[in-house]
Image (cartoon, grey):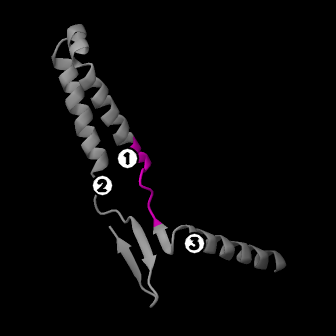
Amino acid sequence: MLYQDQLRKVNKADELDATYRLNGNVFHRKLLSPYRLKGLGYLTLAGATWMNLTAITLMVGSTLPMIALTGSMYMTMQCFNEKNLVSRITALPDGRVAMTI
């Protein structure tokens, strides 16, 4: 029993520390999730393609770079378009919770 009591105390202390770090929130979603980071990679690919469009067009023709540019911009928009995801959960004093979408 002593071991289990110690574990409960440690868990409670960890929960208090996590709540303090979240500024009173129960949950706070990261700004740059792995999915958004993937979208940032696609945006970088689109920017690099756009910056070197002339050289790439002279090497492989005009169709392939434009398809790559269009596809990477489409994937960028898909990665940054996240709907109906909870970004923050805050505990209210009366026992209810407030969710920010």
Residue wearing tag 1: 36
- Residue 32: x and y, percent? 42, 50
Residue 35 magenta-drawn? yes
Residue linked to disc 3: 20
39 in magenta? no
Q: Quadrant of residue 48?
A: top left
- Nearest the viewer among 44 and 77 is 44
The quarter of the picture where the N terminus appears is bottom right
Residue at 39% across / 46% down in the picture? 35
Determine whether, in the image, residue 15 is placed left or right of residue 85: right
Rounded to the nearest angstrom, the CA distance separating label 3 from label 2 is: 27 Å
> Residue 45, located in which quarter of the rendered image?
top left
> Magenta residues, as a range?
28-37
User: Disc 2 residue type?
Assistant: Glu
Place of residue 24 in the rendered image (x, y in percent of width and height, measured from the top left): 51, 75
Judge the density around disc 3: few (<14), some (14-19), many (≥20) Cα neighbours within 10 Å: few
The residue beneath circle 2 is 82
